[in-house]
Image (cartoon, rainbow, N blue to C red):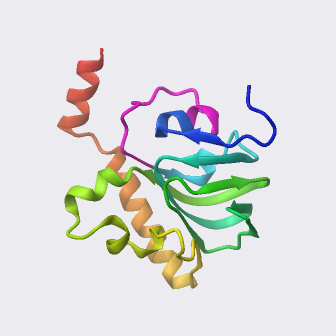
Amino acid sequence: MKRENEILNIETLEMFERLINRDSKQYDTNMMVMPGTLEDKHKNCESIPALRRQFNLIYLLISGEHDVKLGADHLQLKPNDLVVIPENTLYASDHIKNCKGYCIHFKSEFLKPQLKKTFTEEFPFFNFDAPHIINLSQTESEVIQYAFKQIIEENDRTSLEKIFYFVTLF
């Protein structure tokens, strides 16, 4: 049983979905990337206890109420806030209500084969000292929303790799 001030260590995307988002669907424990909407991810979740994820998170809040605790900082998010949470960052939220937006969880290893430099050199917002909440203009937000929609669509598309994986499971 978790003690009041204990920090959870969330090792896999599957574990996060099961424990935090209270999602009973079955997920691959070796999953490397999971895009989605905040409406879907937070439908059973009004808060997030203090935790460290062993994967990265990016999300865009379009509307709703959402606070964020990053390390010692406690901030109230605003519409069009893009939040970048590097793996192993202390994170919590006491208040999540009527959120709309997009999110993606992913392991750094998912992108490493495509990179020419280190992960944080290619993506400076994943440095621990970087700003992790960026308020976007409406135009910037719309561009990011479009990118999220494309990622979700690609993730949901049927592929031979997915079919092969599911056939070998059963």
Q: Nearer the viewer, residue 5 or 155?
A: 5
Q: Picture quarter containing residue 7?
A: top right
Q: Is residue 133 above or below residue 105?
A: below
Instruction: Residue at the far top: name it.
Output: 170
**Residue 110 in the image: above or below residue 29:** below
In the displayed structure, 147 sits above or below 48; it is: below
**Predominant SS of the magenta segment:** loop
- Please identify the quarter of the rendering in which residue 98 is found: bottom right
The part of the image, by quadrant, that contains residue 156 is top left
- Residue 12 located left or right of residue 112: right
Q: Is residue 31 magenta?
A: yes
- Split into 4 quadrants, where in the image is the C terminus? top left
Residue visible at 53% across and 33% down in the picture: 15
- Horizontal side of 153 relative to 69 (left or right) equals left
At x 63%, y 39%, the residue is 21
Total number of numbered discs in the rendering: 0
Q: Nearer the viewer, residue 159 or 9?
A: 9
The one nearer the camera, 141 or 58, is 58
**Magenta span covers which residues?**
17-34
* Residue at image location 78% in from the left, 33% down from the top: 3
Q: Is residue 124 left or right of residue 65?
A: left
Q: Position of residue 133 (x, y in %)?
A: 60, 73
Q: Nearer the viewer, residue 128 or 60?
A: 128
Q: Position of residue 85 (x, y in %)?
A: 54, 61
On the image, the x and y values in percent for residue 164 come to 20, 28
Q: Residue at x 39, y 50 (%)?
A: 107
